Image (tube, rainbow, N blue to C red):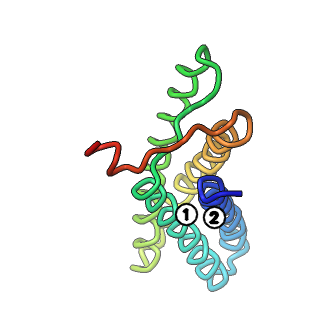
Amino acid sequence: MDINIIMPTVSTFFIVLSAVLVAIGWRLAIQRKLEQHQKVMLYAAIAAVLFFIIYASRTIFIGSTPYNGPDGLKPYYLAFLLFHIVMATVAAVFGITTIVLGYRKRFAKHRKLGRITSIIWFFTAITGVAVYLILYVLYPPADAKPLFEAIFG
């Protein structure tokens, strides 16, 4: 297995791990096990950051893997990908805000935004796995170009 498959697989693992930890953290909050909740949510944030570092590194140094499935499905894939990207961006902003609210002990706002953030994060993780499956499992992955080569020729 080469780096073009390993990095997306590892980054996808971290986003799934992050979502699982968010679910566990949410349950701990409901059970009022708040110290455990805080620790688990910190681990979820770390997993999300690890995902982002791997994803961004791969995109910068190796490039992005283009869609390689049937041409007739490409518009649907692109619409789905756009939905995923928007959700991921919103989830990241909401996630950072939710964490800051928690650490500043603004618990009423943290609780309210945390519920929304968690749901968005779950959709982001699920759609991220779907993108991974489409790009690397369902269809043979296309070759990626390094970002700098794509920009500067």
Residue behind mark 1 = 51
Residue at image position (57%, 27%) is: 77
Q: Earlier in the sequence, mark 1 or mark 2?
A: 2
Residue 9 in the image: above or below residue 65: below
Residue at image position (48%, 58%) is: 58
Nearer to the camera, 138 or 105:
138
Using the rendered view, name the quadrant where residue 92 is placed: bottom left
Outermost residue toward the top? Answer: 72
Residue behind mark 2 = 14
Nearer to the camera, 133 or 65:
65
Q: Amino acid at mark 1?
A: Phe
Badge 2 element: helix
**Residue 28 relative to residue 85: left or right:** right
Question: Picture coordinates of residue 120 (x, y %)?
Answer: 55, 49
Residue 140 in the image: above or below residue 132: above
Q: Amino acid at mark 2?
A: Phe
Residue at image position (55%, 63%) is: 51
Mark 1–mark 2 contact, CB under 8 Å?
yes
